[in-house]
Amino acid sequence: AQTVTQSQPEMSVQEAETVTLSCTYDTSESDYYLFWYKQPPSRQMILVIRQEAYKQQNATENRFSVNFQKAAKSFSLKISDSQLGDAAMYFCAYRSLAYSGAGSYQLTFGKGTKLSVIP
Amino acid sequence: AAGVIQSPRHLIKEKRETATLKCYPIPRHDTVYWYQQGPGQDPQFLISFYEKMQSDKGSIPDRFSAQQFSDYHSELNMSSLELGDSALYFCASSLGNSDQPQHFGDGTRLSIL
């Protein structure tokens, strides 16, 4: 079974500064997806960024980028030019790529990191 | 764009009662996932359906059952409710045989008194 570990329960960042959230995972699979989801106080689960393990290039989405180190099983999220609206709980998640024929690819989440943005 | 619709948004029940949560996936999505997120916890996978058949099962109690209907909407039925069932219940949908990510609904907040 896969496990996802987020070792930082809480982080804070000054507005306009950069912050990096850490995530490590354990798997015996060679192909998989990794995700960062954002959950603001409104409780929605919003997809921030996705990384395919077979791609060496790190994914980026505007101010959000990842540092994917496959050998180290590390998947950190960097938020640049932090904004007040970035304050939320951030979850790292793993999804298998292996197709079992059943069409089910449930997500395994880490415990989350609560990010506060200081004005 | 249409999103995943969950109803009700909030639900209050007493111990030993039953509850039914509903999920309407994004049009053309054939796969539905249910997750349970306890207070201050990460979401835990409960069960999933693909093309109206159960495709995988996680940490779902025997008191819970679910199904996916012909129009692809899904219902999570919960019986003999316990205080520990108080949680946020998410439904997510996706295209089963694709690499597209899951899209989450806004969740149903279930409170057991």
Image: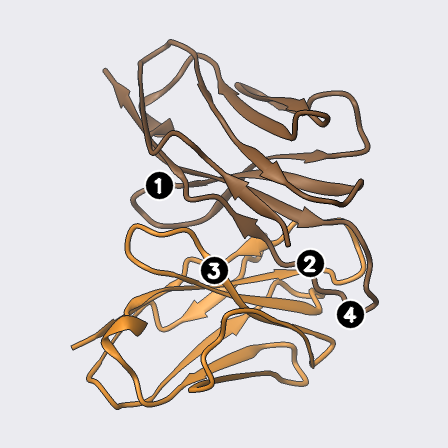
Chain colours: A brown, B orange
Residue matched to label 2: A105
| Mark 3 in CB contact with mark 1 (< 8 angstroms) | no
From this view, report whether residue B105 is shown above or below residue A85. below
Rounded to the nearest angstrom, the CA distance separating label 2 from label 3 is 13 Å
Q: Secondary structure at mark 4?
A: loop
**What is the crowding at mark 4: few (fewer than 14 residues within 10 Å), some, or many (at least 20)?**
some
Rounded to the nearest angstrom, the CA distance separating label 2 from label 4 is 9 Å
Amino acid on which disc 1 is placed: Pro
| x, y percent for residue A46 | 49, 44
In the picture, measured across the screen, residue A108 lies left or right of residue A86, that is right
Marks 2 and 3 share the same chain: no
The image's mark for residue B44 is: 3
Q: Nearer the viewer, residue A85 or A111?
A: A111
| x, y percent for residue B94 | 67, 59
Residue matched to label 4: A102
| Mark 2 in CB contact with mark 3 (< 8 angstroms) | no
- N-terminal of the pair, mark 1 or mark 4, is 1
Residue matched to label 1: A40
